[in-house]
Image: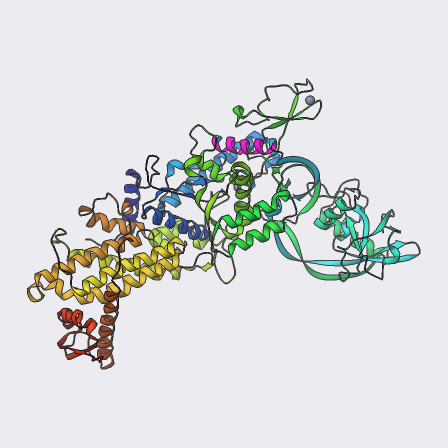
Amino acid sequence: MKNYDFKQVEKEMQNFWNENSIYSFDYESKNEIYSIDTPPPTVSGSLHIGHIFSYTQAEMIARFKRMQGYNVFYPFGFDDNGLPTERLVEKDEGIIAKNLPRSEFIKRCVVTSSKYEKEFKDLWQSLGFSVDWSLQYETINPMVQRISQKSFIRLLKDKKAYMKESPVLWCTECQTSIAQAELETIEKETTFNYVNFQVGEEKLLVATTRPELLYGCVCLFVNPKDDRYIKYIGKNATVPLYDYEIPVLADEKASIDKGSGVVMCATFGDSTDVEWYETHKLPYRKVILPDGTIGESVPLIGGLKVLAARKHIINLLSENGFLIDSENITHTVSVHERCGKEIEIIPSKQWYIDILTNKELFLKAADEINWYPQHMKNRYLLWVENLKWDWCISRQRYFGVPFPIWYCKNCGNVIIADEEMLPVNPIETKPGKICSCGCDEFVPETSVFDTWATSSVTPQINAKWDEENDISDMLLPMSLRTQAHEIIRTWAFYTIVKSLYHTGQIPWKDIMICGFVLAKKGEKISKSKSNSEFSPKLIIENHSADVIRYWAANSKLGSDTFFSIDELTIAKRFITKLWNASKFSISHLQDINLNAHVNLMPVDRWIIDRCTQTTMNARKFLDQYEIGPARHEIDDFFWKDLCDYYIEIVKERLYQPEIHGYEERQSAQYALYYCMLNILKLYAIYVPHITEYIYQEFFRKYENSISLHKLQWETEKSVDDEIIIFGEKLKDIITETRKYKSENALSMKTEIEEVVINTDDKFAELFKQTISDIKACCRAKNIKISVANHS
Ligand SMILES: [Zn+2]
Ligand SMILES: [Zn+2]
């Protein structure tokens, strides 16, 4: 065997797998199906090391399950519509969506997303992902659009989707409504302003962080238990600068200790204002427009942006003697996760999916799903318990799945597309029927679905739900969902919602949640923060896919990990070691006869059983999706038992059969063949390229399989505990001898007089049969076995 050149070999192996469809899902197979609902990455820029970390872990599970005999369904998707893609196109091309004709902008989105999808796919392939690419989907493709629209229509007919005009979470940057799940909270510096309102002859001090909303002020609240203010309840207060009257009301949500204890309610400063607006039936006073400016009709600050308006109003309050104090504070604000802009609350007409009335159902579903790691379930439960808003699914954007509905021009009735028409874009197509009022003119809904409204049906997309080639019976519920923890509240939650609503069952049996990769302490690597020195493409080109994969299998599931290029050193050493050990073994296996009858020597029996034991232990971890601990188990066996001890012990037997015996050599050959082949099988899930290459170079001609990855792990064998203990004792003897030599400054090759082995009679016979091996390995002239007397 030549030297190992990963640049050539990895490409070669990928082509080999591809040409031979090694990873195809078999529709005809009788084997149990193992299906994976893998996250379709959003097309929003380049992939980073964090993606490699999490996707690789899931990929290893696909390989593992395949090698346990499952018929693995491992598809891949791209989430290519929605805001992330739009923002990418805007950034890449320096354009703004709303300045372009709708169709022109969508055209550019299609071009850009297919360009990135190709890059993404190339990257996954260069990592050796065992995806069945014939199962690929894109969330903007016609079939997916059809399933997504079908999902909406059925929810609408079940009264689980509805439209209403109400205050919604609004991003003034992206100019669209968003869902609670798309909020991120950040700490921000601001001022707490103490402003005097007039109540009769008295002044009432009100503390607010949003004085620009004074014109939107609809009442003041005090806590009914706050003795200082009880006398004001029911009276009217005059709004400073604007000079109109509002009532002073009582509500327990007004905090006694915060600010002055009097809080103004404006429409809308935050979600508490919305609650008050609804529970106290308050009027609406419009201040902020969807584009983030103050309405022209608002005196003093009309036309200004929010922050400029705030500054201006503070100056005016101060000049007119209303501002008593201004205190610098840090407070928590909600921002849009996609753009970082502070969220406003603005009333508008939007479509929702009812989730609040079925919280109990969603909480119960969590118990039916196996969460790995278990504690991630709490994040889900916490999120569901604290939900305050129904799921708003309409977005005032362009590149997304359209709502399959129109509104009657005459009576406003909602006209729903027939399912046979799907996918339909109501802007381009008419409903093909008339309204019950007799009118045949319609206004299309121009909003598009939230991207989660589509990605939440990935199990149905994979199963081709109610399509011609529907395989729901075969596939649902799926075996596994893999994902990152920050999208439990979105992707995991919404998928559970849709699955329960559509099929009445959970979407998948297991969910595996991966951690993040951090650049340095506490800092998440993500595309928005450019850690470009960690470009996956460069890392693969310079260090190989196997090396980065081996690194990715380092930690416990769900925990975050750190990355620096230095971290790859261990992986590189491993690749070299695996190559050298294989090369050595193969050089001694050229004349192996696998059909010959061999009487295995004790050391050979030991290493075979240790190999089996390792396989079973690794499987136990992998059944829990613990890729890291499983790898460590295999590493221990490979580095220590096999390389440090076993190969050292049998070297002489392999080299010199004329001294140590020909049958003895055959026994070593048999054990070495067994262990190397099984080591390759175990590592096949982690480093698929080098293992397949070694298999093809030598083992394939003896094994009845075209690819290493079609072989199965040997987990059905039993292990002889006694021989395992014997192996441990033998290792101790060798360690002692090595220690003795190094403490006495002797070379390991130095011959020593005698090694004395103290043992009880249980192991005496095994040691006796091993004398020649110990002699050779320890370079000892004589071995003395001293049997302890138990009686
Ligand atoms: Zn935004
Ligand atoms: Zn009508």
* Quarter of the figure that contains the C terminus: bottom left
Q: Quadrant of residue 765?
A: bottom left
Q: Is residue 149 magenta?
A: yes
Q: In the image, is 322 to the left or to the right of 333?
A: right
**Residue 424 x %, y %:** 55, 27
635 in relation to 213, above or below = below
Tell me the residue at 21%/55% (across/down): 674
Q: Is residue 468 magenta?
A: no
Looking at the picture, how far across and down is residue 476, in whole percent?
Answer: 45, 39
Q: Is residue 263 shown left or right of residue 769?
A: right
Whether residue 227 is visible, yes or no, is: yes
Q: Is residue 138 visible?
A: no
Q: Quadrant of residue 416?
A: top right
Residues in magenta? Answer: 143-156
Looking at the image, which is closer to me, 653 or 347?
Answer: 653
Q: Is residue 709 above or below residue 463?
A: below
Q: Residue at x 52, y 59 (%)?
A: 523
Residue 597 at x, y percent in the picture? 12, 55
